[in-house]
Image (spheres, grey):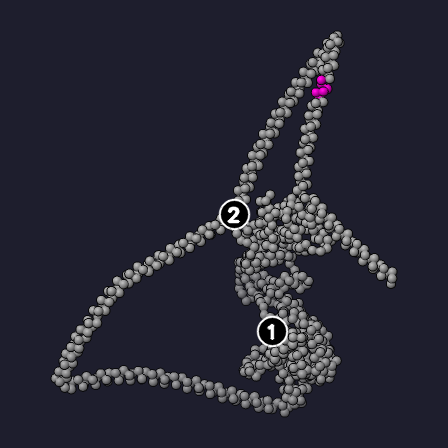
């Protein structure tokens, strides 16, 4: 059974690393049992929520309820054996083994594949994400379709109802009275007092978001001095909706005609200045173009000038040489001979320098070869050392791999399972043989019994007929009858003994089974728990009594 | 004690860092509360502003008494309160930071208490409201279509008889329930078929991902 326990331990370790491996299932504590069984159940059915994962330490009642819940879950997942709270609170090895084997067989295949591929429990972040996506998708595929308006209701919200989000769309030209009261003219103040819509009306009328608009305006005012005015104007121009009536009001109000003229004047001025600036811009453009043209011509002229100067210098020199030809030729020849002599001395010097250097080069070359040999030697030594280290490493690794193969028990287990199967086959054959033998024996027995019966009947008849006349025969007949009765008694006794021995054997087997369940220890545990319960009940009773006393006293 | 002093110093430093977060208009509006505007009106104004901030789509009855006496200041203060809460939520101030901030700007004591209390009570809702704000692609929740066909008429001498589909993808606005067209296009039978097949591909892909 040790192998079975090892397999179970191995599987439990892979499911939940927090389960500490023990050598035998018999030494599992109730806490470990609860942890292991709940982990298995969760792995089989991940949608099980509210599954207790740990056994509470103190109160017996809570322990009892946790154990009962787990037992029910096990039954729901199809366990047919006898199961109840006792298997968790007072575990015995045989029943626990049966339960865990059942649960491990029910584990999903995917997990086992992953295990067989050598992956341990540590999923990396990406795989975990993929798992989660898969889970979400399968949940959503099962979920029924819900119209858009119902999506904000209750628990549907978490299933991706992002159409609820609000576009960040600020109102670019909020009209709020400014900070400095003194700068507001009387008319503007009046406008703000009476006509201007408040903040919420402004935002609501043009379906902008309130918070976005407010944040925008706040930041604009904070950085207003730093941002060039052009940007403000641009942003204001991009707006589609009609500008709030602030700017139009002074024009429209008929009882303020003097306000209209300066505005018109300013407008005309702006028009004039704009025309002027356009004109100036055009002029500037033409002037720029002519400037560039002039620059290009200047560059070409400068290039030409340089080439002409080079030619001029050459011409001047040749003119000087041609002025007095004979003298100049003699000078040139002298120069030539002097140069040749100089060259000879230089070659001589070169040779003088070169020969010793060549010799040293030769010497160094030979030295280099010896050096090379030395370096080769050292390299060989190094490599030998490395080889030694590598072989050592290899040995270590092979030892470790051997250990690991011992640890990885799959092959070993399959081999053993094959052995078991072979053994079982042999045993089955043996059993068949024994059965055959028994049958033949039975047959022989039957034959012999029938023969005996016939013989007896025949003898009986014979003696009975002769007993009518003969006294001896009568006695013989009586004796025969006695013999027959005794014999049948004997046969009965033998069969009874056989039955009794069979019963004895069965009882022995039962006794062994009961011994395996170590009833004594669990009885002790149970009595301990009962004592605890009694204590608890007594405490409660004393509490009740005190309360009752208090009530009566009151 | 040591921790208390530490926290106060850290708060002071954050206040120094945050001191430029409110514009002059906002500060002026906050200073109006409890001074230019009476304490009672300030209270209703704060409550009203908060309600309108938190429920932009709800229909909330107007409160005319806010604007009865000093309308310009009230409008300014409304803006100031909304901005204050928006900035405070954006920068994740707690109520003590808010209090220090307001104290630094010399807000009237009663208004200060009210503003801090309201902020503390509604901080979660304000955060949730601001979390919804942002830019996103439109979600399509509704499809409408028409089958159209050109026919012989006074302007065209013959009819091709080929049907076309005009597909309109849209959504319903969350607040008002009106339908908004996001994209409208026309296609012939083959194009429509390929579109449908692509959509089925999406479904198949989802199934595949969910099962394996």
Q: Which residue is mark 1?
A: A169
Q: Residue A223 falls in which quadrant of the image?
A: bottom right
Q: Chain of mark 2?
A: A
Q: Is residue A277 above or below residue B59?
A: below
Q: Nearer the viewer, residue B78 or A397?
A: A397
Q: Are marks 2 and 1 on the same chain?
A: yes
Q: Is residue A195 above or below residue B204?
A: below
| Residue B36 drawn at (x, y percent) | 71, 85
Q: Residue A416 falls in which quadrant of the image?
A: top right
Front label number (2 vs 1): 2
Q: Which residue is mark 2?
A: A406
Q: Nearer the viewer, residue B42 or B105?
A: B105
- Which residue is drawn at the image coordinates 59% and 52% (left, top)? A13
| Residue A468 drawn at (x, y percent) | 75, 9
- Which residue is drawn at the image coordinates 81% and 56% (left, top)? A542
**Given the current orientation, which residue lies at the most extreme bottom position?**
A258
- Which residue is drawn at the image coordinates 22% and 83% (left, top)? A314
Magenta stretch? A483-488
State the quadrant of the N terminus of chain B.
bottom right
């Amino acid at each position: 059974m040790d192998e079975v326990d090892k397999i179970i331990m191995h599987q439990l370790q892979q499911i939940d690393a927090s389960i500490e491996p023990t050598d035998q299932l018999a030494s599992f504590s109730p806490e470990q049992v609860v942890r292991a069984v709940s982990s298995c159940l969760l792995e089989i059915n991940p949608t099980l929520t509210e599954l207790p994962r740990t056994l509470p330490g103190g109160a017996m009642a809570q322990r009892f309820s946790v154990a009962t819940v787990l037992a029910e879950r096990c039954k729901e997942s199809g366990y047919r054996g006898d199961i109840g709270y006792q298997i968790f609170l007072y575990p015995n090895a045989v029943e626990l083994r049966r339960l865990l084997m059942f649960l491990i067989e029910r584990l999903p295949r995917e997990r086992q594949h992953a295990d067989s591929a050598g992956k341990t429990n540590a999923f990396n972040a990406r795989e975990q994400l993929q798992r989660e996506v898969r889970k979400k998708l399968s949940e959503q595929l099962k979920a029924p379709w819900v119209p858009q308006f119902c999506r904000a209701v209750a628990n549907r919200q978490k299933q991706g109802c992002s159409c609820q989000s609000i576009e960040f769309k600020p109102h670019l030209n909020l009209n709020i009275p400014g900070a400095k009261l003194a700068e507001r003219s009387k008319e503007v103040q009046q406008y703000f007092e009476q006509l201007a819509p408040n903040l919420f009306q402004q935002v609501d009328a043009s379906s902008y978001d309130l918070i976005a608009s407010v944040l925008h305006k706040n930041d604009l005012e904070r950085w207003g001095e730093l941002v060039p005015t052009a940007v403000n104007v641009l942003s204001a121009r991009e707006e589609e909706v009609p500008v709030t009536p602030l700017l139009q009001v002074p024009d429209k109000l008929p009882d303020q005609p003097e306000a209209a003229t300066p505005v018109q004047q300013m407008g005309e001025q702006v028009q004039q200045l704009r025309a002027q600036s356009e004109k100036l811009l055009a002029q500037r453009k033409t002037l720029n173009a002519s400037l560039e043209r002039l620059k290009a011509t200047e560059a070409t002229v400068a290039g030409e000038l340089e080439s002409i100067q080079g030619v001029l210098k050459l011409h001047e020199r040749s003119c000087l040489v041609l002025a007095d030809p004979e003298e100049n030729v003699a000078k040139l020849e002298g120069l030539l001979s002097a140069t040749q002599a100089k060259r000879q001395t230089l070659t001589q010097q070169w040779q003088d320098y070169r020969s010793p250097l060549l010799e040293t080069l030769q010497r160094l070359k030979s030295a280099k070869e010896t050096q090379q040999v030395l370096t080769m030697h050292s390299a060989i030594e190094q490599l030998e050392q490395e080889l030694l280290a590598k072989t050592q490493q290899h040995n270590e690794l092979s030892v470790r791999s051997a250990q690991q193969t011992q640890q990885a028990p799959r092959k070993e287990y399959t081999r053993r399972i094959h052995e078991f199967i072979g053994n079982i086959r042999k045993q089955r054959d043996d059993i068949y043989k024994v059965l055959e033998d028994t049958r033949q024996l039975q047959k022989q027995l039957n034959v012999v019994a029938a023969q005996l019966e016939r013989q007896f009947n025949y003898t009986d008849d014979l003696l009975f007929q002769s007993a009518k006349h003969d006294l001896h025969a009568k006695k013989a007949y009586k004796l025969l009858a006695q013999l027959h009765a005794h014999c049948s008694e004997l046969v009965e006794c033998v069969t009874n003994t056989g039955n009794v021995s069979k019963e004895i054997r069965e009882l022995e087997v039962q006794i062994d089974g009961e011994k395996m369940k170590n009833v004594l220890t669990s009885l002790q545990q149970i009595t301990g728990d009962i004592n605890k319960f009694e204590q608890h009940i007594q405490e409660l009773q004393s509490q009740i009594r005190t309360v009752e006393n208090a009530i009566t006293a009151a | 004690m040591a921790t208390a002093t530490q926290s106060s110093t850290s708060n002071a430093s954050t206040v120094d860092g945050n001191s430029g977060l409110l514009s002059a208009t906002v500060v002026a509006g906050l200073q109006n509360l409890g001074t230019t505007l009476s304490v009672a009106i300030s209270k209703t104004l704060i409550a009203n502003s908060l309600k309108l901030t938190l429920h932009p789509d709800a229909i909330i009855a107007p409160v005319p008494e806010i604007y009865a006496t000093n309308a310009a200041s009230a409008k300014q203060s409304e803006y100031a309160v909304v901005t204050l809460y928006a900035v405070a939520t954006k920068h994740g101030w707690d109520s003590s930071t808010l209090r220090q901030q307001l104290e630094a700007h010399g807000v009237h004591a009663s208004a200060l208490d009210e503003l801090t209390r309201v902020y503390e009570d509604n901080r979660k809702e304000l955060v949730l409201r601001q979390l919804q704000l942002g830019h996103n692609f439109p979600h399509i929740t509704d499809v409408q279509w028409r089958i159209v066909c050109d026919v012989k008429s006074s302007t065209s001498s013959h009819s091709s008889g080929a049907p076309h589909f005009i597909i309109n993808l849209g959504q319903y606005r969350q607040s008002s329930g009106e339908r908004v067209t996001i994209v409208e296009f026309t296609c012939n039978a083959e194009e429509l078929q390929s579109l449908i097949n692509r959509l089925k591909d999406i479904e198949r892909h989802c199934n595949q991902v969910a099962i394996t």
